[in-house]
Image (tube, rainbow, N blue to C red):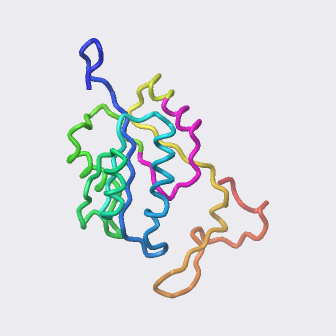
Amino acid sequence: SVDSQGAQKVQHFAVIPARAGSKSFPKKNRYFFHYTADFLEETNLFDQILVSSDDNMILSWAENRGYFAHQREPSLAEDKSRIKDAVVNLIENTPRVQPNDYLWLTYTTSIHKDVEDFRFVRKLIDETSPPAFCTFIEVATHPYIAWFKDETSGTMQQYIPNDAVNRQEFPPA
């Protein structure tokens, strides 16, 4: 869009990537979609909400809310597909998104969203116009005590191999 002086107005788009497939928690994006959508609407920070999905139910929900619903290509919705490729494809198929606009990637499964945090970041962006902005939530669990199941061996493995026993032995995270 264009401002009152005829200059290109920077827009803010919330992006909800919500593919259908999930092995550990089937249809998880369906469970969390409305929570994320309600939150984004509550913030009143976005010119448009964009949804990229291969799940027709999620796309229907997005359209019913007035969002831009993009049918994600199957090759971009696989377990090993990169989110960057899916977002680039979304941008290429969304004529409203311009090079200087901001895209806010919001995962449905990130349930600890705070409106004031989003407003704070929006204020920073409006005041400084950074080329990119990335935020993280402080970890609640130290990576030294995070484990995963190795599918090949069937055994539990540490993400960061260590023999620390006491919390005091952990390096700063």
Rendered view: 149 above or below 124: below
Tally the numbered discs: 0
- Residue occupying the point 34% across, 50% down: 64
In the displayed orientation, state which residue is furthest to the bottom.
153
Magenta-tinted stretch: 105-122
User: Is residue 129 or residue 94 the one in the foreground?
Assistant: 94
- Residue occupying the point 29% across, 46% down: 68
Q: 4 left or right of 31?
A: left
Residue 150 position within the rendered picture, expressed as x and y whole percent measured from the top left: 51, 81
User: Is residue 38 or residue 118 the one in the foreground?
Assistant: 38
Rendered view: 143 above or below 163: above
Residue 118 position within the rendered picture, expressed as x and y whole percent measured from the top left: 53, 37
- Indicate the quadrant where residue 10 lies: top left
Name the quarter where the C terminus is drawn: bottom right
- Residue occupying the point 28% across, 63% down: 76
Q: 9 left or right of 152?
A: left
Rendered view: 157 above or below 139: below
Residue 17 position within the rendered picture, expressed as x and y whole percent measured from the top left: 37, 55
* Magenta highlight on residue 114: yes
- Residue occupying the point 43% across, 69% down: 27
Name the quarter where the N terminus is drawn: top left
User: Is residue 150 or residue 58 the one in the foreground?
Assistant: 58
Residue 25 position within the rendered picture, expressed as x and y whole percent measured from the top left: 49, 72
In the displayed orientation, state which residue is furthest to the front.
64
* Magenta highlight on residue 126: no
Rendered view: 20 above or below 138: below
